[in-house]
Image: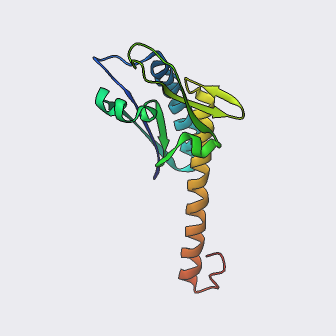
């Protein structure tokens, strides 16, 4: 079975994260649950991984915190979004944190609907790619014109 991979990274300092990362985590749990059920009939599994960024890593690259990566591409890639930044909280210190803007709406906490949409688009892309590959494999085996490749 093919795997849809979702990786999420966020700042963790003294076992704490900021409120927007905490809310995104809750939203990810909901989205991952719904996505797992949605993609199962397509022959896909979902692998979800959480990574902690240290304070040092966060200071070097604050926009890497609260970042969702689906099949090695950022969530923004899949939904035509852009990355911004805004003031956050004490855990993050004076550093601005990541935001996502989609269709003119800016989100500090990533809602489940955006995560699900990005995941379904990525899953659809996986199916399209595997269909075109199997088409070529079948035609090669049958020694028929490889026009689909």
Color style of the picture = rainbow
Query: Picture coordinates of residue 140 (x, y %)?
Result: 55, 81
* Residue 16 position by quadrant: top left
Residue 21, x across and y down, in percent:
46, 22
The x, y position of residue 131, in whole percent, is 60, 63
Q: Count of labels shown?
A: 0
Q: As drawn, is 62 to the left or to the right of 129? A: left
* Position of 22 relative to 8 (above/below): above
Q: Residue furthest front?
A: 94
Q: Residue reaching furthest right?
A: 103
Whether residue 78 is situated above or below residue 89 in the rendered picture: below
Residue at image coords 54%, 75%: 137
* 3, 56: nearer the viewer: 56
Q: Is 61 placed left or right of 117 in the picture?
A: left
Q: Is residue 59 above or below residue 73?
A: above
90 is higher (above) or lower (below) than 111: above
- Rendered image quadrant of residue 40: top right
- Residue ID at (57%, 83%): 142
Is residue 117 found left or right of 137 in the rendered image? Answer: right
- The part of the image, by quadrant, that contains residue 8 is top left
Q: Quick one: 6 or 148, which is closer to the camera?
A: 6
Nearest to the observer: residue 50 or residue 88: 88
Q: Please provide percent x and percent y for residue 113.
A: 63, 30
Image quarter in which the C terminus is found: bottom right
Q: Residue at x 57, y 61 (%)?
A: 129
């Amino acid at each position: 079975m093919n795997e849809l991979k979702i990786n999420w990274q966020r700042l963790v300092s003294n076992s704490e994260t900021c409120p927007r990362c905490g809310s995104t985590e809750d939203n990810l749990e909901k989205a991952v649950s719904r996505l797992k059920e949605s993609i199962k009939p397509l022959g896909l599994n979902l692998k979800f991984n959480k990574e902690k960024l240290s304070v040092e890593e966060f200071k070097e690259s604050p926009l890497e915190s609260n970042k969702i990566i689906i099949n090695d591409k950022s969530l923004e890639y899949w939904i035509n979004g852009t990355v911004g930044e805004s003031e956050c909280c004490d855990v993050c210190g004076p550093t601005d944190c990541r935001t996502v803007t989609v269709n003119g709406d800016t989100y500090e906490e990533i809602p489940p609907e955006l995560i699900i949409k990005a995941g379904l688009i990525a899953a659809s892309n996986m199916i399209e790619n595997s269909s075109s590959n199997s088409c070529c494999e079948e035609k090669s085996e049958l020694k028929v014109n490889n026009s689909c490749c």
